[in-house]
Amino acid sequence: MARAPSPLHRRLWVVVAAALLPTAALFGVAVVLQERNQKAEIARATIETMRAMVSAVDGELQKTIVAGETLVASDSLDQGDIPKFYEEAKRAASAYPNWVTITLSDPRGQQVLNVLEPLDASLASLAQNPSFRRAQTTGKPAIGNLGKEAGRIAFAVCVPVVQEGRLAYVLTILVSPASIQDVIRRQRVPPDGVVSIFDARGHHVARSRNHEGALGRPPSPSMQNLMARGDEGWGQSSTLEGQEIYAAFSRSTESGWSVAVGIPTKQIDEAVSQSLATVGLGLFVSLVVGALVSLAMARLVTRPIRELRSAAQAVGHGAVPELPPTQVAEVHDVALALVGAARARRKAERELEETLARERDARTAAEKANRSKDEFLAMLGHELRNPMSAIGNAIAVIEAQPRKEEPSATETKARRVIRRQVDHLARLVDDLLDVARVVSGKVILELGTVDLAECVRHSIASLTAAGYLESHSVHLDLEPAWVRADATRFEQVINNLVVNAAKYTPKGGHIAIVTRTEDGRASLQVSDDGVGIPSELLPEVFGLFTQGEQALDRAQGGLGIGLTLVRRLVEMHGGEVSATSPGANRGSVFTVDLPSIEPPEDAPVDTPAVRSSRRHVLLVEDNRDAREMLQALLELRGHRVDVANDGPSGVSRALASPPEVAFVDLGLPGFDGYEVARRLRAELPPDKLLLVALSGYGSREDRQKSQEAGFDHHLVKPVANDALENIIARMGAS
């Protein structure tokens, strides 16, 4: 039997009473969390202080390195004038009171000079510590650990001296730990606290308390355990004197040195307890006041709610309710809302149906328009590639013709212009189709191990041969930068960035390309000293069809899609691309950042080019100009060429006189190139015939379809002449 309902005011009393128990529990949890949060905040602030001190220590070490690098840059050392350099070293040593001595050694460690004569044997040992060997092998400055021999304490800073690309000397500066002690003196040490600085080996270099006694000693065992957890941390420990402390430390990623601070446990615990007492009192008062207010408000709510009951029942039956008499504004507003809801209900239902119908129609129209757009772009690319292929082959035929006389400069220039513009049109068509496929998610990357530096070299060689960079000075600063990437797509990224730089840099301008790997990231940077990017255009520079202001002659040209393609391809590789510019006529910098990977164990080996033998070739192409020019080009290279202009005649010609290589256009009259391939594979021995598809379409699906039909290769028009010859050549080499 169902329990009879009870009045609302009684239930509100139960709710208020029930709220007190969890609130009290929350109060206890809040106190515990407050204690943890406060200690965590102290830990965070203390670690931040340690980071700042680590930076100060690194700065002090860097000052010594810079001073050493300044000293080895002396002209006297370059000229081999050791006595003069000795005088310069003595002056430098006297300028730094914390420098114990300066020595200069050859790569074998044999001393050439020292400014402290005779050199103490213990100091000579310090000068030949592992930091000397690191500087010797890496060619970079190295910081040594603290050494203590015969009562002399110092650490070594070794600076390599490279002359004409080889290591000539190693300059060693022995520095007193007093220089590091100065860093502590400049800090605000917590009351009763202790600050320590450790070298990369973990031994004391400086200490705010008992500095002399701690030099060269490791920290307490508990502190060693704490510092073994990572590069920074916080926890309970003890000092060398046995005092219980809260300790924080931070380790430099540059030098490997560490800074630690210890604060007495009692000092922190008392501060936290006072704070908790204040928070606890506030929470308790808030709890009591909240309970009293809740009980008072319960009495004001019950009566107006009863007046809403009849109105709600009317709405539930689909009727328009009457406004109940009430003095509570909220109840009156709810009643008005109920009336409005009842009136708008039917209207809303009708409008919803109409909206859904319009949305379905709009989605259908959008999908149809998108398909039409993709089909148009694909057809446009196909139709443009046919004439470009014919023009490109015609130029190749002209260039391959034997001449009795050298062509005139004007004729040579004209051929180069045609060749360059055909390549430019091919690049525009490829970018236009690629950006459509990338935006729609139809591009699938073929990832492999790629060196960005090698990609840059390939791209620059290709762009230089095509004449894109003939009016600019290009500077390459390339370090190996290995990434997981699609090599073809990433060369496309580099090409677009470099072409963009050349486009907006006047003749005689400079373009610089840099590759680097640092902190697990590989970067590619393309910079120029051209027209720059206006500040208002920077946020939109990677947008589709976005370009800077163009003059009437549109000398810079382009469709405004290259940078969009760059951004989408970089993002598909898990990277980021950014653009910066200091202003008009001050150039611009584009930076690509990618996750780096370890370099492969075996470097790739270039395959030597293979010269082709003369072959019997069948060319099936319905475009007359493209067919005649490609036939002429192949015949000029010594091949015997049969031609056909449709599918049926192509099959008949091949069966009557079987060729060794068949270039077949896919869009043929009669029946298409796929059917040609299927019939030839069914009739001719597969090991005696190389089938190559020619098409204006080059997507992954197009290549897969041609492979399934029996083609060995799929070439996208306009086809590079070298690509044709390489395919024919490798037939005999395979």
Image: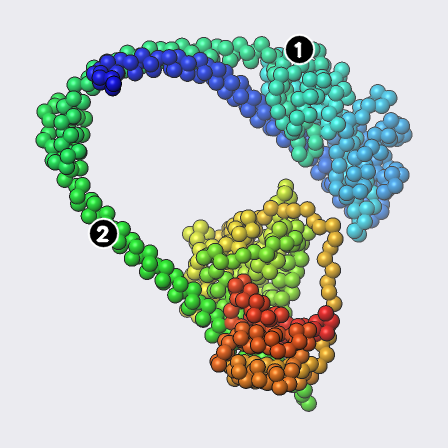
In this rendering, does residue 276 appear at all? yes
If you read the primary sequence from the N terminus, does the residue marked by circle 2 or circle 1 appear first?
Answer: 1
**Callout 2–callout 1 Cβ contact below 8 Å:** no
Does 62 sit left or right of 13 as displayed? right
> Of the residues shown, which amino acid type is indicated by label 2?
Glu
Measuring from the top left, give residue 488's x and y in whole percent. Answer: 60, 60
Residue 518's label in the rendered image is none
- Asked if residue 639 is positioned above or below residue 127 in the image, the reply reads below
Residue 354's label in the rendered image is 2
Does 228 sit left or right of 622 as displayed? right
Between 223 and 312, the one nearer to me in the picture: 312
Marks counted in the figure total 2
Q: Residues within 10 Å of mark 2 (few under 14, many from 20)?
A: few
The residue that mark 1 highlights is 243
Measuring from the top left, give residue 52's x and y in whole percent. Answer: 60, 28
- Mark 2: which secondary structure? helix
Determine the residue positioned at 79% across, 44% down: 161
Image quarter in which the N terminus is found: top left
> Of the residues shown, which amino acid type is indicated by label 1?
Gln
Residue depth check, mark 2 versus mark 1: number of the one nearer the observer: 2
Determine the residue positioned at 62% across, 86% down: 656
Determine the residue positioned at 81% across, 41% down: 136
Between 421 and 520, the one nearer to me in the picture: 520
